[in-house]
Image (cartoon, helix red, strand yellow):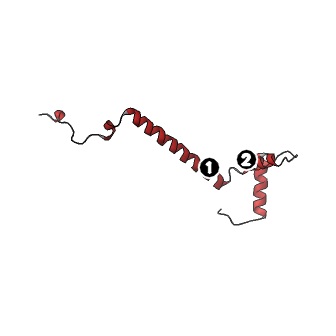
């Protein structure tokens, strides 16, 4: 009896699962990975302050401010100037 004629005693795990179920599992995991990645991205943007300008624009839109909004560049200059003028407890 040659080595190639011997059937394995332990079945390979993926051979017992139909291809359709494997694809469904990948889709389910992919959705969870995307959701997890989106959450991490949101957290890091909030932590680093990247969303501050978007919040500034949203605030201005809801309060109907008649003056034109600051450009993003001017917004960040003003924000850093304000932070330096009135230091408060923060991580960095």
Q: Position of residue 23 (x, y in %)?
A: 43, 35
Check whether the beta carbons of the residues at disc 2 and disc 1 lie within 8 A of each other: no
Left or right, 48 with reference to 3 = right
**Camera sees residue 70:** no
Q: Residues within 10 Å of mark 2 (few under 14, many from 20)?
A: few
Residue position for label 2: 54
Q: Quadrant of the C terminus?
A: bottom right
Residue position for label 1: 42
Left or right, 78 with reference to 44 = right
Task: Say which mark, if any, is on residue 76.
Answer: none
- Frontmost residue, 30 versus 54: 30
Q: Position of residue 43 (x, y in %)?
A: 61, 52
Residue found at x 49% / y 40%: 30
Q: Residue furthest left?
A: 1
Residue found at x 69% / y 66%: 89
Residue found at x 58% / y 46%: 38
Q: Position of residue 45 (x, y in %)?
A: 64, 51
Separation (CA) of disc 2 from disc 1: 13 Å
Q: Secondary structure at mark 2?
A: helix
Q: Secondary structure at mark 1?
A: helix
Q: Residues within 10 Å of mark 1 (few under 14, many from 20)?
A: few
Q: Is residue 11 above or below residue 45?
A: above
Residue found at x 47% / y 42%: 29
Left or right, 36 with reference to 49 = left
């Amino acid at each position: 009896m040659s080595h190639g004629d011997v059937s394995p005693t332990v079945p390979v795990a993926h051979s017992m699962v139909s291809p359709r179920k494997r694809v469904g599992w990948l889709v389910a995991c992919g959705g969870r990975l995307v959701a997890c990645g989106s959450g991490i991205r949101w957290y890091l943007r909030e932590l680093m302050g990247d969303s501050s300008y978007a919040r500034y624009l949203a605030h201005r839109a809801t309060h109907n401010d008649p003056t034109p909004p600051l450009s993003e560049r001017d917004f960040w200059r003003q924000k850093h100037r304000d932070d330096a003028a009135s230091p408060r407890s923060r991580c960095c």
